[in-house]
Amino acid sequence: MLRPVLRVLVTALAVAAALAAGGEAEAPPGALPGFWPDPGETTSTLRPDGAWETGSGGVRVVLVPLDDDARWEWLSANAGAGADPFSPRPGSESQYLSFVLAIANDSRGIVMFNPSRIWLQSDDVDIDIQRPLDLATIQAAWRHLDAEMPPAYEKAASGLLEGETLLHGGDVRQGLLVFRRPRGDPRSFTLSVPMTTGAGEPVELRAAYLEAERAERKRAKQEADSRSRKNKQKKEEAPP
């Protein structure tokens, strides 16, 4: 039987893959609206299915990117939500970047994890550093509009990762991370998920993304360079 952490990740990835199949064929697995994964800029592993993964000392961390439709599917299935507070208005572009984060502690020690230490930084002229949204931030935004947040939105917000957590051996923690889309038109952004094992060892997952057009040009150049190296090697190995 699949562990809960694996079941939710399989579901999220299946939704994302099905949605990507109907979009641009060139976009790689794990692409977000306007951004592609850039695995060359981080030591974390980008899996073939588009999820990021890292681990150390018996701790496994997996990060699954979600588009708007996949986020709604996840909230509906895992938080019992009847509405998505982050859904874009009809005809408008997505204003948020969303991920499912899962942490599995298979060690004998305790893992200390606090979502408030997670950060997303855009790498543009005006550096924009963000923390994941929480229920209090969403409620404050509604109060700013002199309105009360709908109960359906509060239920959806229960799926967000919040509060410091101690994961004992065998524990799994999973939930949604949502960030406001970086201001302006950033070239790239990095998402950092740090935590500490019971032995005091730091574990950090880093996911790097590049603006889609730049990422496509970068991938095309890498593929061209790879073909060139292979052709050169064939010529060198060919008999005189």
Image (spheres, grey):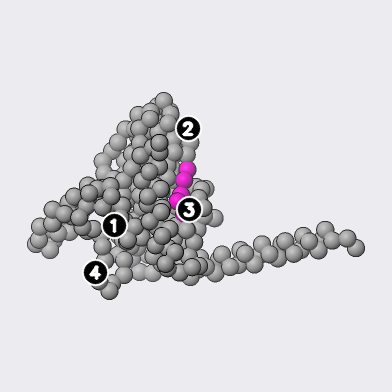
The amino acid type of the residue labelled 4 equals Arg
Comes first in the chain, label 3 or label 2: 3
Residue furthest to the right in view is 240
Q: Nearer the viewer, mark 2 or mark 4?
A: 4
Q: Which residue is mark 1?
A: 72
Q: Which mark is residue 89?
A: 4
Tell me the distance, in whole angstroms, between the alpha carbons under discs 2 and 4: 44 Å
Q: Any mark on residue 211, and which?
A: none
**Residue 54's x, y, as percent?**
47, 43
Q: Position of residue 3 (x, y in %)?
A: 38, 37
In space, the residues marked 4 and 1 are separated at their CA atoms by 14 Å
Residue at 42% of width from left, 68% of height from top?
A: 23
In what element is the residue under mark 1? helix
Answer with left or right where residue 46 lies relative to residue 88.
right
Secondary structure beneath label 2: loop
Residue 49's mark? 3
Nearest to N terminus: mark 2 or mark 1: 2
Q: Residue at x 23, y 58 (%)?
A: 84
Question: Tag on residue 57?
Answer: 2
Tell me the CA gap for discs 2 and 1: 33 Å
Where, by quadrant of the figure, is residue 103 drawn?
top left
Q: Name the N-terminal-most of marks 1 and 3.
A: 3
* Residue 200 % position (x, y): 42, 31
The amino acid pointed to by label 2 is Gly
Magenta span: 50-54
Residue under the image location 26 percent in, 44 percent down: 162
Q: Are marks 4 and 3 in contact (CB under 8 Å)?
A: no
Is residue 13 visible in this depiction of the protein? yes
Q: Earlier in the sequence, mark 4 or mark 1?
A: 1
> What is the C-alpha distance between the residues marked 3 and 2?
24 Å
Front: mark 4 or 1? 1
The question of residue 13 being in magenta is answered with no
